[in-house]
Image: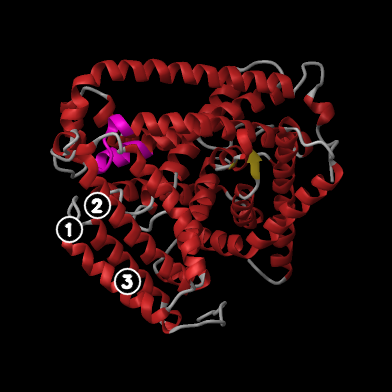
Amino acid sequence: MHLPDGFLDARTALLSTGAAAAGITLAVRRVKASLTPRQIPLLGLSAAFVFAAQMVNFPVAGGTSGHLIGGVLASILLGPSAAIIVITCVLMVQCLMFADGGLLALGANLFNMAIASVCGGYFIYTILRRLLRGDPLRAAVCAAAFAGWCGTVLASICCAGQLALSGTVSWSLAFPAMANIHMLIGAGEGLATGLIVLAVLKSRPELVAGFAEKPMESRGTVVSYGLLLCLGLAVFVAPFACPWPDGLERVAESLGVSSKAAAPLVTTPLANYTFPAFTSATVATAVAGALGTLIAFIAAYGLARALVPALKSSKADAGKNHV
Amino acid sequence: MQARTTFEGQTWLHRVRAGLKLAVTLAVVLFTVMLPRRPHLAALVPLSFLLIVWLSARPPLRLMLKRLLVAEFFILGLALLTVFNPAAAPLVAAALIKSNLCVIALLLLTWSTPFLEILHVLRRLGLPEVMLSTLALMVRYLPVLREESRRMQRARASRTFSSGRRLAWRSLGNIIGQLFVRSADRAERIYLAMCARGWK
């Protein structure tokens, strides 16, 4: 989902760059405060690891193959602040070294993949892991797989919102297409994330940030990431998904965007095309989304049950697979 | 400090300062993106500029086409979204023109500028130290970890005879998990080596 330049207008690109910059600044500050000098090379090596892991192709049906995106995986292994920096570096190298993803759209790509996906995935992972009782290893695998799926879908929804806000592709086309494709891609991402987290937890659980002890992030940091994520969703997604034009115009105005900008659907030639079917389509999308999420969760739970048999204690397994 | 990593096939474009190239690319992209939402004659301005740069620098056509094709995959995918709505046709045509121009500008930049030079520019722009060191280490160890992952996949391929999809996923998960473990161990060794050389 590396957006190229030319599909986002300058306003959306700048808006998402601002949001991404805020998140990255916060992450840099957190990392500076909490990282020991010993861990500094780990960030660079993890960025190289994510890049190398993206080059491993997983077989998908019919001879095609897909690959990992890795944002949620990084946030599980390193914690959200470090993961934001790692994925930011990966995206920057992809853009400036391989021309993969646009230069002006870099901010949007950073917001979608380095912030929305990482933070959203991390929230879901931590909450779910706390909610699931029983074997901690199984809970972690289930939470990781589900979070991997959610992170991918969340990033694609933000991406669709940015496309719609730019007026390039209408929301009624961009949202279902992006969300549907990424619900499938997310299944692969979730499966891979679960398998990789299981492999690391089995062989070296102490490498996974905050697996044994308390979560590594302070409450304040988690809250500010959450606020940033909500703000992004409010700007990129809510104008299209919610029937609250007044509140949104206020948000847009306070952000320095003209009120006309908050409702770009009206200004595009696609307006007449989308509005009649809006309400029924919204309901249908909501139902489909809920159903998809439920299926993804059940699949993640089934995966965790299949991979981590009940009888095996995770403790006995830990440290066995040293290489 | 100018660290050169490519010596073969250098053109005048390679010798232009990286900061200037980055700024010009950004300006071209910004100009292109701000063009009207329908195909417009003003698109000829960035087009002719890029054409002049391309023809005078002569980048290898095959490499550039390969990278353009990768980007085109996504661009055409996005364009495909709107194919059902004829009203949006000029909109999409404009977006196609714009994004292709931008991709070409970025291709010229990445082809002619080693990442290390861009890193120096980013340092001068005041990117946080932690990101600079992460970027530098990442670029340095990228080929190492790629080779490591290839080696592990080769080892797996030579030991397993059946290739069911289930087994493939399981073992690829293990390989990537193991790759992370090895990356973390390598980071530890790098830290010790840095300390041994007087790093603080």
The picture quadrant where one finds residue A205 is: top right
Image disc number at residue B94: 2
Question: What subunit carries mark 3?
Answer: B
**Looking at the picture, which amino acid does disc 2 mark?**
Ala
Question: Residue at 26% across / 67% down in the picture?
Answer: B46
Three-letter code, disc 3: Leu
User: Residue B109 in the image: x percent, y percent?
Assistant: 42, 69
What residue is shown with label 1?
B40
Q: Which mark is residue B157?
A: none
Disc 2 chain ID: B
**Mark 1: which secondary structure?**
loop
**Residue A199 percent coordinates (x, y):** 73, 36
Cα distance, mark 2 to mark 3?
17 Å
Q: Which residues are magenta?
A: A159-173
**Chain-order first, disc 2 or disc 3:** 3
Residue A2, image x, y percentages: 44, 48
Q: Which residue is mark 3?
A: B50
What residue is at 77 percent from the left and 54 percent from the top? B151
Q: Quadrant of the C terminus of chain B?
A: bottom right
